[in-house]
Image (tube, grey):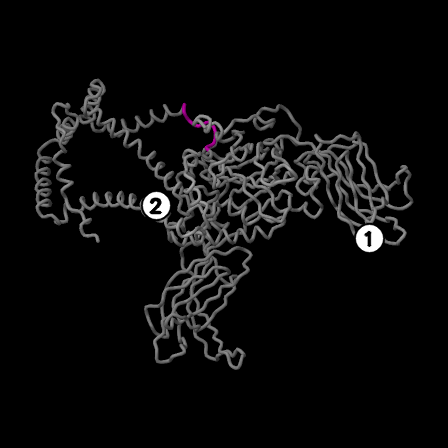
Amino acid sequence: MQKGLVHEEFALKQTAPKIVGSGVMIGGDKVTVAYDLVEQMEYLYVRVVKAKELTKDVTGSCDPYVEVKVGNYKGVTKHFEKKTNPEWNYVFAFSQERLQASYIEVCVKDKDVVLDEMIGRVVFDLVDVPRRVPPDSSLAPQWYRLEDKRGEKLKKGEIMLAVWRGTQADEAFCDAWHSDAAAVGSEGISRIRGKVYLSPRLWYIRVNVIECQDLLPSEKNRQPECCVKVICGNQALKTKISPIRSVNPMWNEDLVFVVAEPFEEPLVITVEDKVGSNFEFLGKCVLPLSIVPRRLDNKPVPSKWHNLEKYTVVEGEKKETKFASKIHLRLSLDGGYHVLDESIHYSSDFKPTSKLLWKSSIGLLELGIISATGLSAMKSKDVRGTTDAYCVAKYGPKWVRTRTIIDSLSPNWNEQYTWEVHDPCTVITVGVFDNGYLQGGKCTSIGKVRIRLSTLETEKVYTHSYPLIVLHPSGVKKMGEVQLAVRFSCTSYVNMLSKYAQPLFPKMHYVHPLSISQQDFLRFQTIQILSTRLGRAEPPLKKEVVEYMLDVGSHIWSVRRAKANFFRLMYVVSPIMAVGRWFDQICHWKNPLTTILIHILFIILVLYPELILPTFFLYLFLIGIWHYRLKPRHPPHMDIHLSHAHTVFPDDLDEEFDTFPTSRGSDKVRMRYDRLRSVGGRIQTVIGDLATQGERFHSLLSWRDPRASALFLTFCLFAAIVMYVTPFQLVALLIGLYLLRHPRFRQKLPSLSTSFFKRLPARADCML
């Protein structure tokens, strides 16, 4: 495939949906204005509340349920056993564009083993159904007497209903049974509904292990080698072995964990003695997190002594020792940190844990999830493939999930969501998934979109179709397109601009920073906690969805990523190299006119040095103004060329999709290890060369080469004397003219300074 065709297939496309926010659709009612980033969808709503005095069948029992029919669509409530006054409070939503009927039939039926018997029904003409426009209150349900098949009113039996027309802006939309999910039974409806989820508030808990007193080791004549193990839920950390080997060891070591509200697991602290290769239990302390003080800054909290419980087993029974050892701890829930759950490079939030430290929001982010087209079939149905697609969007602690559109490769959601924005330099992530709940399997990712808010103009609506690009073991693949509408509204432009001068993270990250290894460990634990907590919601947000949205495993080695990052680095360095090539052309008089102009500019700047900085900043200003015409007109999106996904080799893909630890055979792993050694060898050589140049600079004054250092110091003394007696402008002028001299005055051999520098000693000869 040609490069142009590849670029076109994976490119971002401008769209023009019929929405008020983009100015494409003129006018509209209250509903359209409220949902101005999505297309208006009309629905017929039927709320079935309850029934009373239902007649019993010949057996004397009644197992009622309600069946709502509109044309070819039929919705059914759950049934109650032996109940004449059932309550359902169930809402049905029938898509108006698919309706081919003139009336609604609401039937109350008695569930039976052989044939369900109709108890009664109510019929409505669609022409008479009223329209509800939010923010009007919900339509009040009314009692309707049931009638038989001939239309005659029954003596007993009534049902409470409400029937109205509305749009997706209606409050009943999220919890309703939808006609486009008619194949899903009442038990599976909750699994396909759209919901809003909030991440639990996450805290870093710091355990400062100070010392222990009066430990009782099993061998009294041996000095114990003690360490402290702290367990918090699924997290476990150990201190180092105390350098003081006695019954009163000291550590003064910090252990940091991540916990979520509400706190469910206590802190379990045990003291262990290393005996040979084993550890002997010396005492335990269990502390609930509710007693741990909270702090907002770096001020130390008071430390406390805690008793260490120790049990001995006597004839199968635990017997507590009367004498208790003690442990000295300083515990704190640090609310001044932002608990990282996403990669720093595309995080959606930087606020600290404690709400007392939050600042006011600077704006509002609105997202319209409109539709998707050309989705790949993720599961087979009959003889064709199908997809039950839904979207998940994550920004800050708020996750949203659209409803699932059953059996469609071009679903229309038209759902709109909002978030408060506290920092413009954040990223919203939108993922598309195939719903695996109904088959009892996993949800499969179809693709994701990331949009950085700082790349958006305020108050402008961006309507684009984003390609869903996924890297498979077989190569890069486009899984379809998702159409989004995005608007970033700013409440105070001054407050937003002031954010650019503030630190990215809260103060505690700089005052008392966490190490890189701590950050990696805590982020992994944070993702596990979020997966567990969101998986317990109803409907659950599955673990595979959370991990895909948070990019778990992105730090694992990949040849493709290493190559892509190398070329990113080369792209960043390329302007410096371009300036170097341009200056070399100037020095070699490739274009005499340009070189003469540079001479004139150089002489002016030397004679008037106060013009150097103004000229430099004016030059940057003019370049920026010149590039304004080339500024991007749409948000940046996944780039397969930047990611080197279009030229990756099959074995590189197999390595990238391998599990960690590896599941491949020894021959395959040996081959990859050899290749990694080859790549690492080249990286090692480059790093060694950089280190060598730096060590040569150090050796100028270190007297490792006494003759070279003596020559350099002699030159420095001579240069200092010359600089004292010679005007600076003259020295700069002579140096500049020497660098810009004509090629006839140049020689191909290296310069004197280059030759001297390359002869300086480095420490490479001291390495094994």
Locate residue 610, reporting x and y percent. 22, 29
Whether tag 1 and tag 2 are in contact, CB under 8 A, the answer is no
The answer to which of 176 and 692 lies nearer the viewer is: 692
Q: Amino acid at mark 2?
A: Arg
Total marks in image: 2
Which residue is identified by label 1?
83
Q: CA distance from mark 1 to mark 2?
A: 72 Å
Q: Residue furthest top?
A: 593
Taking the spot 68% from the left edge, 45% from the top edge, the residue there is 189
Q: Please tell me how crowded label 2 is: few (under 14), some (14-19), or many (20+) other residues with Cα within 10 Å.
A: few
Q: Residue furthest bottom?
A: 315
Vertically, is 612 above or below 142? Answer: above
Q: Amino acid at mark 1?
A: Lys
Q: Quadrant of residue 239?
A: bottom left
Magenta residue span: 629-636
- Which secondary structure, mark 2? helix
181 horizontally vs 204: left or right: right
Which residue is identified by label 2?
675
The answer to which of 1 and 292 lies nearer the viewer is: 1
